[in-house]
Image: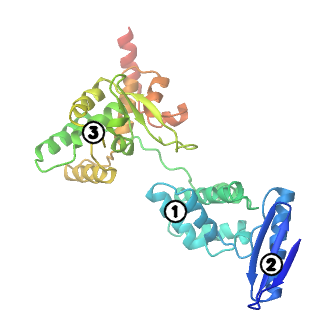
Amino acid sequence: MATFTQLPSGKWRAQVRIKDYYKSATRPLKRDAIAWATAVEAQVGSMQISGYQAIPTGYTLSNLIESYLKDVAPEGRSKLFTVDMLNTKLGHIQLKNISPITLRDFVNDRLKTAGGVTVAGDLSALGTILKYGRHVLKVDINPDIAKSARADLGARNLDTRGQERDRIATDDEIKRLYKEWQSNKLLELPMVALTKFALATAMRQAEICNLTVEDINAKDKTALIRDRKDPRRKIGNHQTVPLLPEAWAIVEPILKKKTEGKLFGAYERSVSARFTRTCTKLKIKDLHFHDLRHTAITNLFKAGLQIQEVALLSGHKTWEQLRRYTHVKASDVHKKFEALE
């Protein structure tokens, strides 16, 4: 199966041929070439039996993370930060040595500076990387080891679910924000239009900022949201959503002036920073741009839209996903019932 040839330089070339599989390498000594060939044959044998290759000798979690980042490239600063942290704390460990004890020690260390929600997120990210290794690279590793470690957090009586936000913007807060931006003659960002559009569409900040003129269908009054956020499939998850009258009233004048490029000409980070600074200046406490999405979805339900209609706008696939964005009060139900009477 393996052949060894001494080269004129004195080094040894090892060649492994197993059916359609071929691999070769050159080593300084014959014993090194034999060791390499033995390891390769073991990997090929493992793949023929189980469908997965044995973990290469010396292959670390850092090696796996490097492949994962090149192939998958997760989006978002928080995700990249988590992966970088995992690389720093666990990257040196050989993949074959990652065990429940390894993750126990990792959790103990993380809990010195982070809470249960953060640690659960760390383990979830690790699980994603291990799944990539098994299902994409076909390396014989157990991807559920991180999932088990996350489940073990419950035995520590740790809260692993973040508190759901229920903050919505009041009419007075929105008016104050509009007044501040309209009075700022040096403000280049179209903050009023962006905020009105967010309240009219329930779109996320990134979705709004990434919209282009080409994504708007003027005939049908719709917008194409590309790669919309989804827990299972984001890439290619394009969705066409209706632009209701308030949203269309914002878009229509822009289309008369622009024929291509970003609809609002704004970048997500700049919009977020401006929104936060203005709220701080006006002493509007604990209001984020993303809370406008909560506000919009709540208003859509108050307006009488059904779950499936709101879901079409918001992009949620299930009621459980949508429910956390709704903040309809008991008094709102009474008002609607009275209106029906």
- Which residue is drawn at the image coordinates 55% and 44% (left, top)? 231
Q: Identify the secondary structure beneath mark 1.
A: helix
User: Mark 2: which amino acid?
Assistant: Ala
- Circle nearer the N terminus (3, 1): 1
Does 155 sit left or right of 72 as displayed? right
Rendered-image quadrant of the N terminus: bottom right
Residues under labels 1 and 2: Cα distance?
A: 40 Å
Q: Quadrant of residue 40?
A: bottom right
Residues under labels 2 and 3: Cα distance?
A: 65 Å
- Circle nearer the N terminus (1, 2): 2
Residues under labels 3 and 1: Cα distance?
A: 31 Å
Q: Is residue 213 above or below residue 10?
A: above
Q: Which mark is residue 14?
A: 2
Residue sticking out furthest to the bottom: 10
How many residues crowd around disc 1 within 10 Å: few (fewer than 14), some, or many (20 or more)? some
User: Mark 3: which amino acid?
Assistant: Thr
Q: Position of residue 102 (x, y in %)?
A: 68, 70
Q: Position of residue 267 (x, y in %)?
A: 31, 50
Does 139 sit left or right of 184 as displayed? right
- Circle nearer the N terminus (2, 3): 2
Q: Identify the secondary structure beneath mark 3.
A: helix
Residue ID for mark 1: 82
- Which residue is drawn at the image coordinates 14% and 41% (left, top)? 182
The way the protein has been coloured in the rendering is rainbow
Q: Nearer the viewer, mark 1 or mark 2?
A: 2
Q: Which mark is residue 195?
A: 3
User: Mark 1: which amino acid?
Assistant: Thr
- Which residue is drawn at the image coordinates 40% and 14% (left, top)? 337
Q: Position of residue 96 (x, y in %)?
A: 74, 70
Q: Quadrant of residue 301?
A: top left
Answer yes or no: is residue 27 visible: yes
Q: Position of residue 217 (x, y in %)?
A: 36, 28
